[in-house]
Image (spheres, helix red, strand yellow):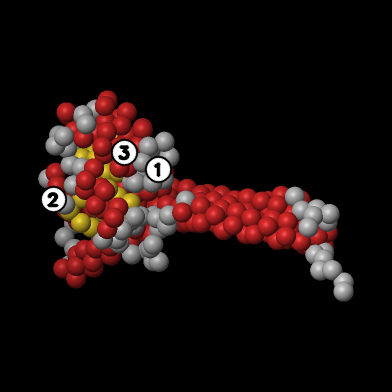
Amino acid sequence: MQSETIPVEELRQLLAGVSDHGTQHLLEVEADLMQTTYLLSEAIEKLGACFMSVHEAVTAQQQELDLLLQQTKLPSEQQQKLLHYREVIAKEVNTAVTGLQFQDLTSQLIARTIKRVNGLKELLSALATHGDSMDSEQEHQEIARLLQEMNQSLNSRSVELSGGLRKAVDQHHMGSGEIELF
Amino acid sequence: MAKTILAVDDSGSLRQMVAFSLTAAGYQVVQAVDGQDGLNKARDQVVDLVLTDQNMPNMDGLTLIKSLRGMSSYQKVPILMLTTESSDEMKAKGRAAGANGWLVKPFDPKRLIDVVQKVIG
């Protein structure tokens, strides 16, 4: 009867392949996330500056209008229209201030994702290291023990990674959050 | 004389929006980039209200609140948390640390001003 053998070399190559390919893809994910962070930072900087400039100009325009209104008697209908536009601007400014907080939330989510990607890279690296410790000369039982150890190590690292990534952003839309006074 | 509010947040865009909203309502706003910076600025000048984020580098919001409550000049100064965190567990920690209120981001400027006016007038 032929004795039971494990194709250790092939198993080691498989583990190394999973580790290498996985790491390459995760490096791409990390690079894309870093680029997204950069683009979002630049976008919010420009949006913030534009918002402040527009608001400053609109405020100055309204002050000029107030002066004109003091000097000129406008028909009631036109006065009402000007008041209406003022209210619309104030409402939209409020909405814009809430919307312009998006970068604070997205940057936290991206930072969390990058941490997870780095944790996964460590997991894959551990997988390859464990694979390297296997030898074709080892007995079946010894190989089985190494695979079991590998599994336990990956499990504990995965649990550790999840534990260190407490989700701080639960918001799914950019509406105003709740307020509670103690 | 305008009342002074210390706004502590590691996000520049968030600080900008807080400062914009509160300045428009007549308050003076001092900005700090994290808890440690907030603590330093609170030592330099006793403010009328502290508005702080929770998750920040160097020092988080809860640690800042505990440090401020340990200072005699800040035992009665209102402190509000303005954070993405909304769990009851975190709110309980904030309350235990000495926070007077909890605001979940993103904030609406009108509602923020209403709360600030309610707390410090």
Q: Residues within 10 Å of mark 1 (few under 14, many from 20)?
A: some
Q: Quadrant of residue B72?
A: top left
User: Image height check: is A53 above or below A9?
Assistant: above
Give the chain letter at badge 2.
B
Which of the pair B66/A131 is nearer the observer?
A131
Q: Which residue bears the numbered disc 2?
A: B118
Q: Please give the chain letter of the residue carrying mark 3.
A: B
Disc 3 marks which residue? B63
Query: Where is residue A179 shown, x and y percent of the image?
Result: 23, 58
Q: Amino acid at mark 3?
A: Thr
> Which secondary structure, mark 2?
helix
- Residue at which label 1 appears: B56
Looking at the image, which residue sits at the far front?
A1
Residue drawn at x 60%, y 54% is: A153
| Labels 3 and 2 in the same subunit | yes
Q: Chain of mark 1?
A: B
Point out the image quarter for the N terminus of chain A.
Answer: bottom right
The residues bearing labels 3 and 2 have C-alpha atoms spaced at a distance of 25 Å
